[in-house]
Amino acid sequence: MRCRRRASAASRTVSMRVVPVAWLNSRSRAWAPPGAFPTLSVSCPRVRTRDGFLRQGGVFCRWGMIRCEHMFDGLIPQGLDEMEPGPALAGFLASIDVGELSGHDRIVVLRAHQRMVSCYTARVYEDMAAVVDRMHQLGDDRQLAEESAAAEIRAALHLTRRAADIELGWALDLEQRLPQVWELLAAGDIDVRRAKAIIVATSHLPVETARDVVDQVIDLAPELTVGQLTARLRRLCIAVDPQQAQRRYDDAVAERRVIVEPNEAGTANLSGFDLPPHRVAAITRRINRLARTLRTPDESRTMDQLRADVFMDLLAAAGGTVAADRGVVDIHVDLETLTGLSEAPGELAGYGPVIADIARQVVGRQERA
């Protein structure tokens, strides 16, 4: 927004832009980064500045509003995408005309907006958890408080019952199980996709164990893709409790199944769930190899189409592909794991970490082939 400030009687009225300040932990101080204000003035009761910081182009104040003329002059402040999410960053972003920025600066603004989205997402989840706390304070037991809160959230946000339960589940996980992930999300250092990936990957672990695992990746999480982060967490979860990982694997394989589902276009999907990963890797490699042998200069089908046709031919035993061969997989495993001296996970190429027992089975089959 814009305001007008009247200076001394001898001076003219100057048009100023009001920029909200970014509160620090004490909630009694605020700051703006060096270089953010080409022409700076601070106007408010109880304003204090630190000369050293002010000389660098920044400002430090208490209980005030930062005011500046010509805030950006067509440029964005240095370090905009590293600012702490909050009122100051929101004020800066609201004042930027993206159409006047260079390609690089537009990426900086994109990153800054993403930090704000992450921060507000964390706040929304914090508010959801606060509803549960309030219901509990009113006398409901914990389970009833969560059910009541989910109903309130569903009505307030126009969600389905299932969607409200899921969103509240994320909120409670961030508040109760993994507060360090909430802090990272609120700081804008990770997005909600990474936060949810961490929650899902550690959901089977006891709270303290889950926190210890997360602490090992928390510093790297902002720089990793969701896939990289998930793979690293899977490996850590296997390593922290190999016996429990083996039990989870056995229980999941016992639930293996094939599901057929129709599509709106009239096609269908055929999917296998909870299959042994080493067998899936071998089958996938075999399908790819057979599809490549069918790729001739006269072949009009794409590789995706060829793989799908090979998949169906193999299952239907139609004989429309080349002769069958044994599937081969690549796996990396420590010698100690192979000899049974360690339960460290192996690494299955194209899949990721696998429990030690699977790694030993794969190597044993390859040796017998």
Image (cartoon, helix red, strand yellow):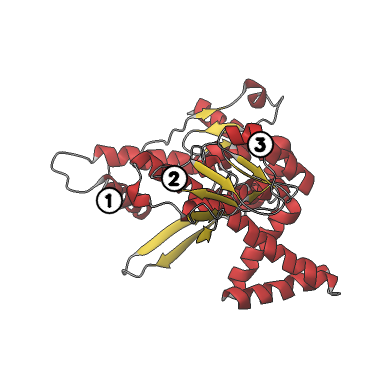
**Mark toward the viewer: 2 or 1:** 2
Q: Is residue 228 left or right of residue 267?
A: right
Residue 83: x, y in percent? 57, 43
In the image, residue 60 lies at what x, y percent?
65, 42
Q: Which residue is mark 2?
A: 72
- Residue count near mark 2 (Cα–Cα under 10 Å), binned few <14, some 14–19, many ≥20: some
For disc 3, the marked residue is 236
Query: Please, is residue 219 above or below residue 315 in the view?
Result: above
Q: Amino acid at mark 1?
A: Gln
Residue 305, which numbered label? 1
Front residue of 169/336: it is 169
Tell me the CA gap for discs 2 and 1: 53 Å
Residue type, mark 3 in image: Leu
Please give the label number shown on residue 174.
none
User: Which residue is rendered at x = 64% and y = 31% of the image?
Assistant: 52
**Helix, strand or loop status at disc 3:** helix
Q: Nearer the viewer, mark 3 or mark 2?
A: 2
Assess whether mark 3 and mark 1 are in contact (beta carbons under 8 angstroms): no
Relative to 89, residue 130 above or below: below
